Amino acid sequence: MPRRAVDPHELRAAVHKVMNWVDGAAPEPPRAEVAAAVRLSLRTLEQIAPGRSVEVRVPPFAAIQCVAGPGHTRGTPPNVIETDPHTWLRLATGRLLWTEALVEGRVNASGSRADLDPWLPLLRPGE
């Protein structure tokens, strides 16, 4: 059964609640607020880059499969991206560029399709 589409207003509201933390201007907000922002942003990525060739993991909150191409059904997928919630939200909001995150080691990406640069940011700064 397909998931309900993410309402862009709901995504912006969830991300707005954690933006001071994302920008480094406040301590980490309540876990539920971070979880909501991460999950909604990952589901948005899933919608704009449909497919099953890349698994994106942001523990402990969520993992999705996205990007068109050969999918996988069992075992460890060949294309995996993993990062922490703070880094993910910085990427999703354009506060951090994909290439910078890779160079700085903030993202672990393996596999030939493990590149989210074409779809990031999900929200532009100021949205």
Image: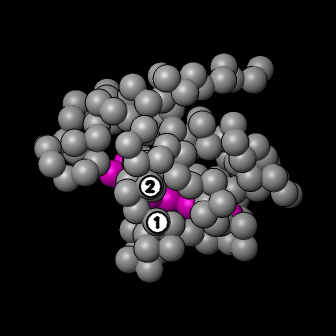
In this view, the residue in front, 3 or 76, is 3
Query: Label 2 sits on what residue type?
Result: Gly
Q: Residue at x 56, y 61 (%)?
A: 81
Determine whether label 1 and label 2 are within 8 Å by CB. yes
Q: Is residue 4 left or right of residue 83?
A: right
* 84 in the magenta segment: yes
- Relative to 23, residue 99 above or below: below
Q: Residue at x 59, y 25 (%)?
A: 6
Marks 1/2: CA distance? Answer: 6 Å
In this view, the residue in front, 78 or 105, is 105
Residue 76 in view here = no
Q: Which mark is residue 114?
A: none
Report x, y in % for residue 72. 79, 53
10 Å neighbourhood of mark 2: few (<14), some, or many (≥20)?
some
Query: Label 1 sits on what residue type?
Result: Leu
Name the residue beneath numbered marker 1: 97
In this view, the residue in front, 110 or 44, is 44
**The residue tagged with tag 1: helix, strand or loop?**
loop
Name the residue beneath numbered marker 2: 94
> Magenta residues, as a range?
79-88
Residue 10 in view here = yes
In which quarter of the view is residue 63 placed? Answer: top right
Report x, y in % for residue 25. 15, 48
Q: Residue at x 49, y 43 (%)?
A: 123
